[in-house]
Image: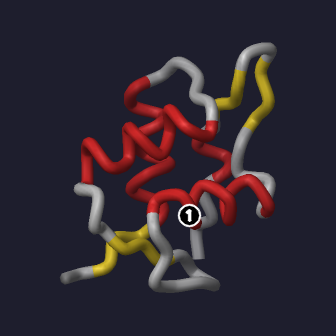
């Protein structure tokens, strides 16, 4: 199974608009990419959807909102 870059998830969030909770984002990722999908970023690999969401939260990739979080183009690294 090929690994999917985490930027695909951030781009999915931007395209969809709106906001997410941790649980709703994991559900959306699994619906889009499959429950067994594995993800990588510039500095981590072999993550599940839940692990990727936790990683992004720890790296400050989400923008807090009153009822959850979102992201923005500026949160996607370009290296």
| Residue at x-position 50% and y-position 39% | 25
Q: How many marks?
A: 1
Q: Nearer the viewer, residue 37 or 74?
A: 37
Q: How is the image coloured?
A: secondary structure
Q: Position of residue 10 (x, y in %)?
A: 50, 48
| Residue at x-position 71% and y-position 51% | 61
Q: Is residue 79 above or below residue 37?
A: below
In the rendered image, which quarter contains the N terminus? Answer: bottom left
Q: Secondary structure at mark 1?
A: helix
Q: Position of residue 73 (x, y in %)?
A: 58, 43
62 with respect to 46 (left or right): right
Q: Nearer the viewer, residue 66 or 42?
A: 66
Q: Position of residue 11 (x, y in %)?
A: 43, 45
Q: Is residue 66 above or below residue 70?
A: above
Q: Residue furthest top?
A: 66
Q: Is residue 6 above or below residue 2?
A: above
Q: Is residue 70 above or below residue 58?
A: above
Residue 66: quarter of image: top right
Other-residue count near label 1 (Cα within 10 Å), few / some / many at <14 / 14–19 / ≥20: many
In the rendered image, which quarter contains the C terminus? Answer: bottom right
27 with respect to 77 (left or right): left
Q: Residue furthest left?
A: 1
Residue 53: quarter of image: bottom right
16 with respect to 43 (left or right): left
Residue 36: quarter of image: bottom left
Q: Which residue is mark 1?
A: 52
């Amino acid at each position: 199974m090929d690994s999917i870059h985490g930027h695909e998830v951030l781009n999915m969030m931007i395209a969809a608009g709106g906001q997410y909770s941790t649980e709703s984002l994991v559900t959306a990722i699994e619906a889009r990419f499959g429950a067994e999908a594995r993800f990588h970023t510039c500095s981590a690999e072999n993550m599940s959807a839940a692990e990727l969401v936790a990683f992004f939260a720890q790296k400050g990739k989400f923008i807090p909102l009153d009822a959850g979080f979102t992201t923005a183009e500026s949160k996607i690294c370009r290296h």
